[in-house]
Amino acid sequence: MTPDELAARLRRGDPTTILDVRNRDEFEEWHVEGASVTATQIPAIRFTQAEVLGTVSDLAERFTDSSGPVVAVCAEGRSSDHVAELLSDAGVDAENLETGMEGWARVYRASTIDHPDATVIQYDRPSSGCLGYMVVSGTEAVVVDPLRAFADRYVADAREHGAEIVAAVDTHVHADHVSGVRAVAEQTGATVALPVGATDRGLSFDARLLEDGDTIAVGDTELHAVNSPGHTSEMTAYRLGDLLFVGDGLFVESVARPDLEDGDEGAPAAARRLHETLVERYATLDGDTSIAPGHYGDPTVANDDGVFVATLATLRQRLDAFSMNTEEFVEFVLSDMPPRPSNYERIIDVNLGKASLDADEAFDVELGPNNCAATKTSA
């Protein structure tokens, strides 16, 4: 099974059993997740031993009642290939995930968000739940929160739509992935744009600095900057008509974590800013405004049209955070945060231009779950 085929299964919600044959610590740090996934971990060495002892059938019995195929997974698809073969010989419907978790991290799906003023593409990296966007109007395009690993993809997709990318924009200084704004600009000559507050965080390369209310022209329309601090001090959303690209400030099942900029010490103040953004700043927005987030978690299921978008009215009903007072919100958010993203401090330095990585290093440093939400369930 190719990584793209696995992604298609999970997007459809097809029941799938994942057998991860890496070591336990690798599995616990990061593995294939999804609403329709049943994941288990048995190291490959157990199957090698069972092959020698002639007891593979004992291990295979664990999968006789599995929903859907058993997909064996390892780091690069070699050890898992042997495990899948052993299980198949024992009568289990088993397949190997080609190229393993490395290949899984290279899956990047595109879906179209319905919009009257432009073609809007939502990009989905299922290995981390990371979302990016491209807005195409006429012969121009803008990318929002692009990933460096997929810079070529944005350029090619824009040209397929008869457009050239004129701006590459980040909503904030990302902590979970290496930004692609400069890589896209190098290929296209596009303007690099970041929130003005990025300078206070140590931005060390030239960029257009956006303040609240500034606009980014794209063809016959424009994006409007909406300052929305909380996840980070400079967090800025971008509004395209009734669609709001919120970065990591708000998700369709949860809210942002506030500790990735100033750590535990600065988290309470950041949480208060986030609450103000949600209940005051966003209070000026109509409930029909569609929220397009920068991430989604493993409980989240895409809409029927394949995109991860929800109206603000829906989120106001779904998320208790909108009805909490400030101190209740702060206590809740700080009490239920997952581990910080792997290598987040190094990634922040790269995205500020204070450090550099080659392409392979940049890909490796961001592998793993995003962990940018305060919780993995509704807040």
Image (cartoon, grey):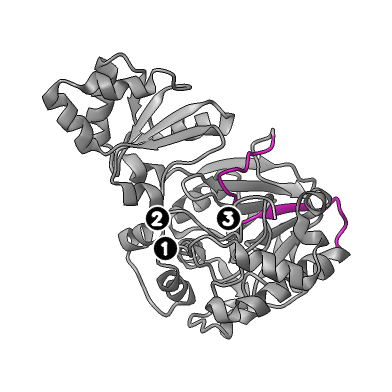
Mark 1 vs 2, N-terminal side = 1
Among the 4 quarters of the image, the one containing residue 344:
bottom left
Whole-percent x, y for residue 316 in the image = 81, 54
Q: Is residue 29 magenta?
A: no
Among the 4 quarters of the image, the one containing residue 354:
bottom left
Among the 4 quarters of the image, the one containing residue 250:
bottom right
Please indicate whether residue 226 sits to the left or right of residue 41 in the image: right
58 is higher (above) or lower (below) than 46: above
Distance from Cα at disc 1 to Cα at disc 3: 34 Å
Whole-percent x, y for residue 265 in the image = 56, 81
Residue 367: which numbered mark, if any? 2
Distance from Cα at disc 1 to Cα at disc 2: 8 Å
**Type of the residue with mark 1:** Ser
Residue 140: which numbered mark, if any? none
Q: Which residue is mark 1?
A: 342
Mark 1 vs 3, N-terminal side = 3
What residue sits 17% from the left and 31% below the top?
A: 48
Outermost residue toward the top? 91
Whole-percent x, y for residue 58 in the image = 26, 21
- Magenta residue span: 285-303
- Residue 331 appears in view: yes
Task: Name the quadrant of the N terminus.
Answer: top left
Q: Is residue 300 magenta?
A: yes
Q: Which residue is mark 3?
A: 164
Mark 1 and mark 3 in contact? Answer it, CB < 8 Å.
no
